[in-house]
Amino acid sequence: MNFFWFISENFLETLDIADAGADVFRVPDYNMRSRVCAHNDRWFCFKERLVENLKEKLAQALNAAKSLEAVEKIRVDFLGRKGSITTLAKNTDFATMTAEAKKEFGQKLNELKNFAQERIAAALAAVQASNVHHKSNDLDLTAPGKGRRLGALHPITLAQMELEDIFQGMGFSVLYGPEVESEYFCFEALNIPHDHPARDMQDTFWLKNQLILRTHTSANQVRTLLRFGAPIRAIFPGRCFRYESVDPSHENTFYQCEGLVVDKDISVANLIAVMKTILSQVFKRDVKVRLRPGYFPFVEPGFELDLNCLLCGGKGCSTCGDGWIELIPCGLIHPEVLRHGGIDPKEYSGFAFGVGLTRLAMMKFGIRDIRYLNCGDLRVNEQFTTLV
Ligand code: FA5
């Protein structure tokens, strides 16, 4: 059964259907006429027609809306405080309706509101999506790019990689040992017993179970000999730790690159030939070096190979002190060390050296203070991006 409700002419105007004869029905029925009279300027409409009409109007308006602002205006026009749907609800004279009509119209009104909300939300999403699409169409392929920041390898890593290349070119293997080392391999196996004064120069960080943070990569010597035997040619680059005061050329954490050659008839001449080759390949120019006697309990004879400081040209500076920087101590392997490694010193001899890798990187790249290398300041690393 159809029922009627009362709406003012003003409201029909806001709906833009006041003149649309097909949409608005004056009711010819006598009884209804009397109700029209009773409400003066009010019109009767069939609810279904009016609701459908609002839906159509909304759909048309949304179809034409191409911007977020246009959709928002439609929302206000239909659902806002003075919007068509709100006004329709407000102006409905529920008091004159039967309970059944009230319920039916209430449902219709809710449906209409839901319909409007859903359509408006969909229109909003469509406009937003088309905006994104529009923006991507605006992509200017000729615009200058923003560029990607390249990461950089640490200067010590660069120096280490270069050394590894050079030594591999000379037939050396590259091996890595543990940073947490036993006292035995770090000291005793290297002829530095518990009460030896040489231990004082290499105090370190002590862990439990007689384990320590290794003080030098020489700790790999006996480990490697026990594992691989002779003949052998290997280097062991890696991090070392010492409990000592920090200054421009000393850190508590630094890198060395140990070298070990054991074979028949190895002499100091072989050692010096290898040292010369490394230096010429790393620095790619003439550098001044000096070789002087040096004492290490695990080599005999032992040498200190110093580099004429490349930062001050040998004049003396805060990094080197007197113009020379200790770079590669070396020597012929002590027979006792060979024995610890299970090698017969009557059959084999060998040499070992310990490149100060961190200091080598400083000399190579012109870094005046060793503390820059461990400080974690990216501005240090960023200077080396082009070398990767
Ligand atoms: C040693 O550590 C010996 N194991 C080297 C060696 C190997 C000798 C094989 C003979 C045969 P030394 O303590 O001098 O030696 O250290 C070797 C190099 O490591 C030094 O020349 C220096 O370049 C570097 N070095 C030592 N201590 C530090 C430190 N605190 N900070 C930065 N570099 C260091």
Image (cartoon, grey):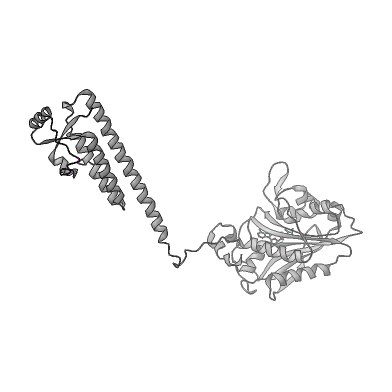
Is residue 146 highlighted in magenta? no
Residue 224 locus on image (x, y percent): 80, 53
Is residue 24 highlighted in magenta? yes
* Residue 190 sits above or below residue 4 on the image: below
Magenta segment = 19-26
Q: Is residue 129 left or right of residue 225?
A: left
Residue at the location (25% across, 26% down)? 103
The image quarter in which residue 330 lies: bottom right
Residue at the location (29% across, 51% down)? 64
* Residue 122 sits above or below residue 373 on the image: above
Residue 139 locus on image (x, y percent): 43, 62
Q: Quadrant of the C terminus?
A: bottom right
- Looking at this view, is 379 or 370 the one in front? 379
Q: Quadrant of ligand 1?
A: bottom right
The image quarter in which residue 377 lies: bottom right
Residue 99 locus on image (x, y percent): 22, 23
